[in-house]
Image: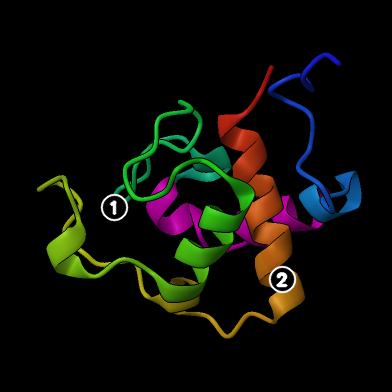
Amino acid sequence: MAAAPSNALPAGVTAAMVSAGDSLFNAPRSCNGCHGKGGVDGRNGPNLTTGKYEHVDGSYASIVHVITVGIPKDSIKHAEHRFPMRPQGGHDYSDEQIANLAAYVWTLGHHG
């Protein structure tokens, strides 16, 4: 049996989740404030579109985890990124919103 293409959505992730996550990520004062619009090199976060990961293994589950718990300052690997990633990016997202954000972020690094 052939493996699924690398850009196939993870199990349980839908296009509607990706769309909702896009809206959350790119809203004012949200993830794009650090990661940039569309996840492309913001002022305090890495480019999320390269498919290269520093704090996760690229899996949907690892992205959910890092959004949920954040990244402490002493784990930030680039000096130009001066601030930690607060849990939930400093917001009070629901589990559904975190799942949607993770779905969108996953697609940024797994485009075909």
Q: Quadrant of residue 5?
A: top right
Residue 9 % position (x, y): 78, 37
22 magenta-colored: yes
Q: Is residue 69 above or below residue 37?
A: below
Q: Nearer the viewer, residue 11 or 2?
A: 2
Choose mark 1 or mark 2, whichever is in front: 2
Tag 2 residue: 97
Q: Residue at x 57, y 45 (%)?
A: 59
Q: Is residue 78 left or right of residue 106?
A: left
Q: Nearer the viewer, residue 43 or 111?
A: 111
As drawn, is 104 to the left or to the right of 32? right
Residue, disc 1: 44
Question: What span is in magenta?
Answer: 19-35
Instruction: Name the element at disc 1.
Output: loop
Instruction: Tell me if 84 is positioned left or right of 97 in this view.
Output: left
The local crowd at label 1, few if under 14, some if 14 to 19, many if 20 or more residues have their Cα within 10 Å, is some
- Badge 2 crowding class, 10 Å Cα cut-off, few under 14, some 14 to 19, many 20 or more, is some
Q: Main secondary structure of the magenta part?
A: helix
Q: Amino acid at mark 2?
A: Gln
- Which three-letter amino acid code belongs to the residue tagged 1? Asn
Membership of 24 in magenta stretch: yes
